[in-house]
Amino acid sequence: MERTKSATGAFAAVTTLFFAWGFITSIVDPLVAAVKSIFSLTNVEAQVSTFAFFIAYGVVSIPAAILVSRLRAVPSIIVAIGMMVVACIIMLIGADAAAYVGVLAGLFVMASGITILQVAANPLAAALGRPERSHFRLTFSQAFNSFGTVLGPLLGAGLLLRGMDVKPGETLMPAARTAALGSINTAFLIIAVLLAILGAFIWWSRRRIDEAAPPLAAAHGFGETLGEVFCSRWALFGGFAIFVYVGAEVSIGSQMALFLNSRPIWDIPLQQAGFYVSLYWGGAMVGRFIGSALLTRFPAYRLLAINAAVAALLCLFVVLSRGVPAGWAAIAIGLFNSIMFPVIFTLTLERSTASTEATSGFLCMAIIGGALLPLLVGKVADLSDYATALVVPLVCYVVLLLFALGAGRARTHAAGVDTGVTPH
């Protein structure tokens, strides 16, 4: 009984981390629209902000897995939060110097800290309790991550997109540019303070988390960790699924304000469009709370297949249409994104023959899809329009449908986990 109470308290503490990185990550969406105007960028150049953020997952994830296996969860989390505070300081310096490269550097360091958090917290949330409820726990934690992604764009749009409507071929007035850079300062100063508070709370909860956390596997080096992953077909397949999922989700979210602002869709002011980004992420939040309940009753792979199929159909509708319905269809994709990340993550952990730390590190490394696919989507948008660019996420969701169907037929390796699938 005492062990269960300790695990519940530890799970609650870890869930605050999911909220924090969701809040910070979603601020990148209005930031992309803001820097496009501030620095007079093309769609592809503006998406370099997203690239700088998500490329960190490709660079840092495996070292993060090694760090977590050596330091344990709480010290690794404290290191990650410290890096994120440093990132806020870099962002402040970059904004003061009106240097886009400074903003990009800050985003990279910020995402490096978030990568360590994800490598530590995702498997931890899944493991803090009965094995058969791992899908539920990670999806429930991800619901609070989505709550953060709802609040992030609201703050970001309010601070970063005020007076930022610039027509093609025009440049931002000097006074408006100075005000916009000051808004970046304000946003990341707020984030730095919140991170400091979060770090203090996790340190205060450290004993509870350490007592409830499962034992870690022996620490391996970089080559050994990658070797484990490449010997597991399902670790690789799961990594590819995470790659395309995050790429699709981020591509849609980071372009959403510009998409709704465009004349063929809603033709509304950019700041107003930025507020609607919260509905996209809000759909994911609602879907994760609903999904948490459904995952206690239905096989995870089946729910993933349904969501991927509906998301693909919504993308197809946007590609083939325009106007108000297309805008709402794009926003609705967030609802069906909801359970995808946690379910892909836990389905892969159950089927991977690599260690939990190695698999988790590789899956977080695959989040690099959020760096690469938005560049492709931005290029398609430059060559055609924002609606046509959703053909890229459409292909991604078809891949996820195939992953879900494959997972339904695959053998599991996690002892004691009931996925509703008969191994064969």
Image: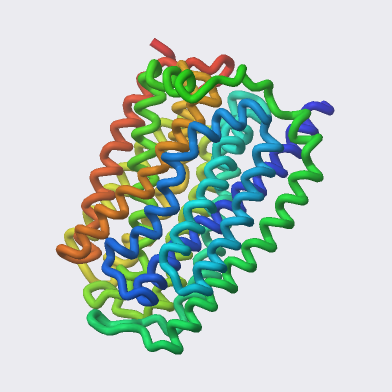
Q: Quadrant of residue 402?
A: top left
In the foreground, 337 or 38: 38
The residue at the far right in this view is 2
Residue 389 vs 270, above or below: the answer is above
In the foreground, 333 or 38: 38
Residue under the image location 57 percent in, 52 percent down: 21
Q: Quadrant of residue 379?
A: bottom left
Say if residue 158 shows up in the picture. no
Residue 144 vs 362, above or below: the answer is below
Residue under the image location 55 percent in, 58 percent down: 24
Residue under the image location 57 percent in, 70 percent down: 187
- All told, the count of numbered labels is 0
In the foreground, 134 or 371: 371
Question: Going by the image, does 224 lie left or right of 37?
Answer: right
Residue 149: image x %, image y %?
52, 58
Residue 204: image x %, image y %?
81, 45
Say if residue 207 shows up in the picture. yes
Residue 223: image x %, image y %?
45, 21
Query: Which quadrant does the N terminus fall into?
Result: top right
Residue under the image location 65 percent in, 25 percent down: 130
Query: Which quadrant does the C terminus fall into?
Result: top left
Residue 163: image x %, image y %?
43, 85
